Structure formats: structure tokens, C-alpha cells
Image (cartoon, rainbow, N blue to C red):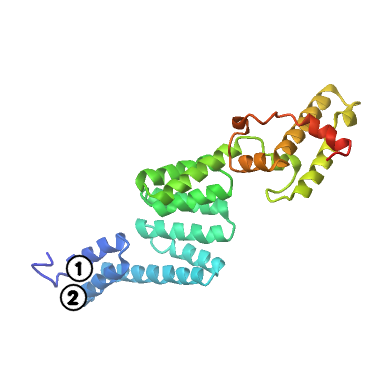
Amino acid sequence: ILRMDSTNADALYVRGLCLYYEDCIDKAVQFFVQALRMAPDHEKARLACRNAKALKAKKEEGNQAFKNNNYEAAYQLYTEALTIDPNNIKTNAKLYCNRATAGAKLKKLNQAIEDCTSAIKLDDTYIKAYLRRAQCFMDTEQYEEAVRDYEKVYQTEKTSDHKHLLKNAQLQLKKSKRKDYYKVLGVGKNATEDEIKKAYRKRALMHHPDRHSAATPEVQKEEEKKFKEVGEAFTVLSDPKKKIRYDNGHDLEDDGSFDGGGKCLLWFFFFGWI
């Protein structure tokens, strides 16, 4: 139509509308402006032009606030932008993802996950939203969900970076399903050798069977189980080679050196040999 009549206001408006819904807002505005030049009373073009300019301005404000590390302001601006035109699916998908990024910076991880999910519902090919949600799942230790999202990304774009992210998520999932020896001893993953020994002494004394000899059989059984886990944890975390294998997610049984008990270590400890 525009080849035949470049002054057709309706055609200019519809062309602009198509660009607007493809998130080409700058080009869309140009066509809306042209339509209004041809027909100043074109109400639909006027409304679309106003929405497009408002959406562009609010999104850019949010982006600038984010670049300035003002994440609270960015989060609020993206929220305001999302109310301008619920029908603009592609732009709103990006706004949800942007808000998720700001939310993650503010440690609003569950809300960030929800925003990514909203973005994906609007555009299920939006790789950036899958990547952002996967990272939030990793940060909240929801490793199965993170693996699912990274698998989706890798199936779509088989890059070395995406493969690395998927493998790391799979490793963290594997590690999450075994005993957390750091948690057993009540220390952080960066604990020093002395901190591990002190924590071991404290937990071993706490759960030693002799301390619970007057308890019910159920309690005795539970404390004996915990006492054994303390021994296992110290057996691994006090041995540099086993600790490295454990931290890297390897199965300790693979090298044939893990006895799983740590009883001798416990007695050595109590007699002052450790």
C-alpha cells in the first residue's frame, strides 16, 4: 500500500504498530509521526505514539538507573513501565527480565524467578530470561530447576559457555544429593584446618554415645548416627586429598580410600593424638 501511496495514514499507522509490537519502538514512532502528519486527527496513531514514547522513556530511565547501580530505582521504573501497555508482549518480556536482574541485585531472588517466568510465558524463546532464572535457581540452591533451564538453553544454543553452565549446575545437583560434611561439622566451606578441628571436637563431644547412655533407645540410636557422621565428615575434611575430591564433587569411594567411619580418628582425638 505504501509503495502505491506513501501518504496513506492508516497504512503508516499499521506499519508502525507492527514495528512497535516487535519491540522496534524508535522506528515505530517514526511511522506514527508520519501518520499524524498525513492525518492530524488519527486518534489511534496518536495513542500508539504516546504509548510508544512513554514506554521507551520509562525503560531507558530504568536502564540508566541500573547502570548507576541504583537498583531500587531501576526496579520501580521497570515496574511502572510494565503498566503502560500490557499488550506489548516482546517489550514487556524484556522489562520482566530487566526487573528480574535488578531484583537479583537486591537479593529478591524468589521475585526475580517469578519475573523470569513471566518473561518466558510471554516469549518462550527468550534465552536471556532462561539464563537469568537459572542463575537465580543456582543462588537459591534449586539445582534441579537450574539444570532444566540450562538444558533448555544448551539445546537452543550449543555454545561452550552454555555447556559449561549446564555442567556446573549438574555438578552442584550431584553434590547437593550427598551428605554435606561442612554442615555436619557446622563450618563454612572456607573453614581452616584449625576451625575444622575445633568444630569436630565440639560436635564429637556433643553426640558421643557415653553422653547419651541414659537416654531412650531412639535418642541413643540417633545420637550414635550423628556421632558416626561427625567421624565421616572429619575423615574427609581433615585429609587434603579427600577434601579436594569432595569439594570437586567426585565420589570418594572411587579411589578406594574412604572407610566411611572415622572411628579411629575419633579415639585418636579423644586421647589427644590429634
Mark 2 or mark 1, earlier in chain: 1
Where residue 119 sits in the image (x, y, percent)?
Answer: 42, 53
Q: Nearer the viewer, residue 217 or 210?
A: 210
Identify the amino acid type marked 1.
Leu
Where residue 267 sits in the image (x, y, percent)?
Answer: 84, 32
Judged by depth in the image, the label closer to the viewer, 2 or 1, is 1
What residue is drawn where x is 22% and y is 74%? 34
Q: Is residue 132 above or below residue 255?
A: below
What residue is drawn where x is 27% and y is 63%? 19
What residue is drawn where x is 53% and y is 51%? 136
Q: Which residue is mark 2?
A: 38
**Quadrant containing the N terminus in the rendered view:** bottom left
Identify the amino acid type marked 2.
Met
Circle number at residue 71: none
Q: CA distance from mark 2 to mark 1?
A: 9 Å
Q: Which residue is mark 1?
A: 12
For residue 214, what is the image quadrant?
A: top right
On the picture, is 160 further left or further right than 215? left
Q: Is residue 83 above or below residue 236?
A: below
